[in-house]
Structure formats: structure tokens, C-alpha cells
Image: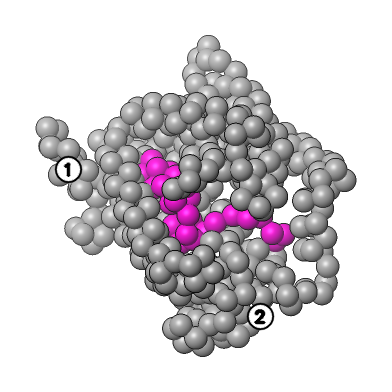
Amino acid sequence: MTEMVHGTIPVVAGDPVLPRWWRTIDKWTMTCILSLFGIGLLLGFASSPPLAADNGLEPFYYVKRQAQFGTIAMIVMFVTSMMSPQLVRRLGVIGFIGAFIALAFLPWLGTDFGKGAVRWYSFGFASVQPSEFLKPGFVIIAAWFMAASQELGGPPGKLYSFILAIMIVAMLALQPDFGQACLVLFAWGVMYFVGGASMALLLGIAGLVIVAGMFAYSNSEHFARRIDGFLNPEVDPTTQLGYAANAIREGGFFGVGVGEGEVKWSLPDAHTDFIIAVAAEEYGLLLVLVIVAIYAAIVIRSLLRLVRERDPFIRLAGTGLACSFGVQAFINMGVAIRILPAKGMTLPFVSYGGSSLIAGGIALGMLLAFTRSRPQGEIEDILRKGR
């Protein structure tokens, strides 16, 4: 943990892969990610036994599954974080193509598991949600397009990335999955802003999003029902939002005690979309604040390292990955405390879900690879020389 105390150790040419990786990786961010996974397992012990009982399974069946998926996610994350930015880019493009094709065939081959939205492929022993794997791939390919557009005589990469974002948003809206659609559009907007977009253009796109939202409200019963539920000043105590709000109230600052919570017996998605309500009820506001602080630390520390990066592709891709990760966490917790309409989005690395965990491992592995220390002059040095 030398870096945590004394700063980054310079890379020594010719180092073997593992020592070089250990010297250059952001150990604070990696520690925060591992902490999130540990908290997810802890909350899995509290939230998943009722679901296991309903399905006739052993009490900690879903905790074991989460540990298995999490182990795969950690391995994927560590391996990806050892890759060079060029190799990460290749991985992202290949992964994006595969996920995009899977998303395109979802309306015909997918299933909704009775939730009203066709988002998964079911293989009996497991299910896969293509949109989870599409997000990191999209960030990589959009950043590549945008970085290429900054080169002399480069292609109109910003336009290409925008067309691609609109195609993905339309495909996700048809499932319907408006939460993931918003997340993809947000990631594109952040990268576009960092890449030098004008505020007028971004405001124009925001206006188009509002118009699209009004159209969706008028033509999608699924979307309209969620918006109406959010705008209703009185929360039905027998709905998921009602149970979650009551659990957060009951938890107070220190919680009602480990295993003493009641919300997990009422919420069908207590182990996924509303796991923060379980955390608030059993462990109190104290644990919730710790979780929020960990997410904030990952995002802020990553952005601080990326702001010193010279390579525009690394800077754009890393910013898109970090901000998407943070905003997904904000959306999940915002739904639970009713400052946002219900989205059906997991809490990264904490909620149960194989697709979410493994795709999160890929995304954060990419982020760790981009924020590694490299033997380069910092961007501030270049700016000083230009004066």
C-alpha cells in the first residue's frame, strides 16, 4: 500500500506484468471496489433468505450465487485492469458488437420473467441481460470515435457516436428499459461535454430528451404508470416504494438490528433494486452514508487521475465509465428514497445479479486500466510548455 502513503511509484521498464500492475494500479479505488462487493455479500445474507424460501431453496442459495458471480467479476476485473489501453479498446469494441447483436435479437428470443419488459436471455441455469454488457462497450467505442474526431483530418466521430447512442436508446426504449436508455445517453453526454461540446448543443439535446419523454408518457403504459406513481403525492404503503420508504424511516441512524428488518419479507426486489432499503432498515443511515461515500470516492478519485491524462481516448473513456458507474448508483438510491421514478436498476456491485456483477467487473477493470500510472508527462506539463 506504498502508493497510499508516498504516492505513485514510477514504472520500471522491463518489469514483469504483475509487479508493474501492482506499482501502477490505483489501490485506493481497488480497495473501495472490494469493499462494495463485501457489503453486497453482507446485505445478501439479510435480503435474500425470504426469496429463497419462496422458491423452496436453501436460505443462503442466492448469497452463494452472488459469491460465485462476484468471484468471476473480480477475476475479470483484475485481468482487464492489467491490459494496456489499446487492448482494452479492442476488448470494448468486440464486446460492444456482441452485446449490440444480442440486444437487437432480444424482442424475438428474450424473456421478461413476468416483469413486463423483455430484457433477458434465459438459459435455464442462468440469465443474461445484454444491456449491462453493452454499456461499457458503448463507452469505449464512443470515446474512440470522439478521440478520432480530434485528429487532423479525422472522421466526424462525434456525429457517429451520437447516431450510435440514438440507435441504442431506441432499442432499449422498445423493451422497455428507459433507465438503461437514460444511462447510455448520459454517458454519451458526459463524454461529449468533456470532448468539447457547446452548451447550446447539449441544451438542444436535453430538449429533445424532454420531448421524447413526453411521447413515451403518451404511448407507453409501462412508462406512464411509473411516472404517475412518482408524481402521486401519497405513496401507497403496499407498493414497493411504500415498503422501501417505511423501511428507511424505521431504520433511523443505527438500524433495527441485523436480521430484524421486515422489508425483505414484503419487497420482491429487496435483494436487487431495493437493497439499499434493507441496508437502511437493518444497519441504519450510518451504513448508507458509508456506501454513498465509497461510490463518491471511486468516482472522484478516478476523475482526478483522469484529468492529468494526455491521451484523449483514455480521458474520455475513463470519464464515461466513472460517471456512468456513479450515476447508476445515484439512480438506484434515488428511486428508493423517492427522488426519482422507479427504474429497475441495480446498485453496482451491491445488488444481486450475475449480469450486473460481471459487466460491472468488466467496466471497473477498464476504469482501473485507464487510471493506472503511465510513464508520460502530465497534461499540465504540456500546457506550461505551450505558454
Q: Amino acid at mark 1?
A: Leu
Going from the N terminus, do you reach mark 1 or mark 2 first?
Answer: 1
- At label 2, counting other C-alpha atoms closer than 10 Å, the crowd grade (few under 14, some 14-19, many 20 or more) is some
Percent coordinates x, y for residue 3 in the rendering: 23, 55
Give the farthest residue toward the front: 56
93 lies above or below 378: above
Q: Which residue is mark 1?
A: 18
Q: Is residue 1 left or right of residue 56?
A: left
Q: Where residue 253 sits: x, y (%)?
A: 53, 85
Q: Amino acid at mark 2?
A: Asn
Question: In the rendered view, does 231 fall on the left or right side of 118?
Answer: right
Q: Which residues are magenta?
A: 340-367
Crowding near pointer 1: few (<14 within 10 Å), some, many (20+)? few
- Tell me where residue 35 appears, x and y as whole percent: 36, 64
Report the disc number at residue 369: none
The answer to whether mark 1 and mark 2 are in CB contact below 8 A is: no
What residue is rendered at 66% in x and 34% in y?
A: 107
Residue at x 35%, y 59% (from the top left corner): 67
Q: Quadrant of the N terminus?
A: bottom left
Q: Which residue is mark 2?
A: 246
Looking at the image, which is closer to me, 269 or 315? 269
